[in-house]
Amino acid sequence: MRRSEIRDHLLDTALRLFNQHGYHATGIDLIIAEAGVAKTTLYRHFETKEDLILAALERRDEGDRNAMRAFVEQHASDPVERLLVTFDFLETTVRDKQFRGCIFVSAAGEHKDAAHAVFRAALMHKRLVIAYFEELAHAARFAEPKRIATEINLLHEGAMAVAQMTRIAEPARQARRMAGQLLAAEERSPSARGRRPANAKPHLAQG
Amino acid sequence: MRRSEIRDHLLDTALRLFNQHGYHATGIDLIIAEAGVAKTTLYRHFETKEDLILAALERRDEGDRNAMRAFVEQHASDPVERLLVTFDFLETTVRDKQFRGCIFVSAAGEHKDAAHAVFRAALMHKRLVIAYFEELAHAARFAEPKRIATEINLLHEGAMAVAQMTRIAEPARQARRMAGQLLAAEERSPSARGRRPANAKPHLAQG
DNA sequence: TAAGAAGTATACCGATCTGTATCGTTAGGC
DNA sequence: GCCTAACGATACAGATCGGTATACTTCTTA
């Protein structure tokens, strides 16, 4: 392994173990053993375990949001449909056999102080995801894109929490159907309704 | 403190600290210090820390579900309204300044192995809550009470996850409005529709 | 009221935790 | 090709973890 790759390899290994066992339950010794590097090397890249966690969350934040954007742009062009397609992306996430809940919610759950850097990093991820939903809701010309975004986000969070316990992908599909039902009843700007009547898209109600 | 009260006092102290700091981050020494008992006493009541966690979750499971039942029965008699009132109970929960996320989701998040006793205890709580929702959905004569129950549950989980991060109560109200919107569009058995037309209850759509 | 169960206080155990120190080796940029 | 920074390996420090042992005291109850 080239030296320039070590940092990312450490982050990926740590993310895998944090997801598998949790943050407190994953020791530094396990991380370096799984990554196959010396402890000195880890502490040359990251000052403390908390720094490692923060860097790992940052990496995952970027990766996840980029992946969602790419998935959405590839699977739908209609802006309303794009909001629903985010649930298809979610389904691919929870369908992974290694899925054990949202790592950001888990991170906040193990660092519950709202002033803690790890909590704030997790919160920032959620805010950026909601901002993306709002961007989609705005493009779809919904009358209240902010509210639509938080509703979509609430359904995402619910599906992930349920899937964390049941370890099945159905909650993601159920959340998609619920979102379709709700969006079909939402007001959109006249120009949007003119081009695409809100009640004329069966996929909206059927998810 | 009477000796018969010590066990419950230990469980309440442990629950408070688990909620405040998490399960791994809460040490035995802190629990006994906060409870004001000797370590020997704790280990006379609970064989291991895991046993303490399990007993604490069990206590909280019973308390929470009883509280929700009592709240619902006190605040609504109409069976559809009762499903929505569960979100008012949720709002009282997340409005507590000490709310830091669902302790069962956090427990599962820190004990991610689906075969782990703590994970299974958390899962059992969720199943019992869904069973109660199904009971309410059945009483409301919805055509698919099982699906309705899981949808209500998904909204509950979403609201709790969002409130865990934002530390505000609004997600609970938003989830109630979403539930009202969804239930208003649901089919109910003829006798139910005969007595109470599904589309004639404005509170359903407005939450 | 006497006996026994359960409480307190404290010292201790071995394991594990994060993080550091030491030192020989290796790889990459000039 | 050489110099230096980064690597691997290992030992270790100091704190904390869950859990036990011991010795003394207090409450409960038959």
Image: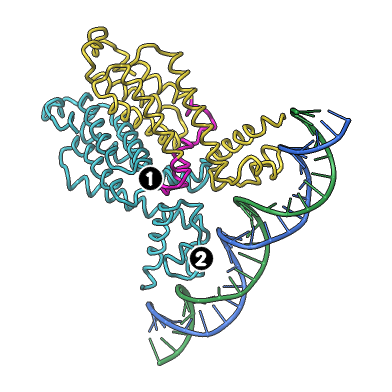
Chain colours: A cyan, B yellow, C blue, D green
| Numbered badge on residue A57 | none
Q: Is disc 1 in contact with disc 2, using a CB cutoff of under 8 Å? A: no
Percent across and percent down for residue A196 are 12, 29
Residue assigned mark 1? A102
The image quarter containing residue B178 is top left
Question: Which region is colored magenta?
Answer: B93-120
- SS for tag 1? loop
> Residue A175: within the magenta?
no
Residue A120 seen in render: no
Would you identify the image quadrant in which residue B200 lies?
Answer: top left
Q: Nearer the viewer, residue A178 or B116?
A: B116
Tally of numbered discs: 2
Residue located beneath label 2 in the image: A43
Q: Choose top left, top right, bottom left or bottom right for residue A83.
A: top left
Packing grade of label 2 (10 A; few <14, some 14-19, many >=20) is some
Q: Residue at x 36, y 73 (%)?
A: A2
Q: Position of residue A99 (x, y in %)?
A: 34, 49
Secondary structure under tag 2 reads helix
Residue in the image at 28% along x and 24% along y:
B145
In the image, residue B113 sits, relative to residue B162, either above or below, namely: below
Decide if residue B63 is in sight here: yes
Q: Residue furthest top?
A: B195
B101 inside magenta stretch = yes
Q: Amino acid at mark 2?
A: Tyr
Whole-number angstrom distance, CA of label 1 to CA of label 2: 27 Å
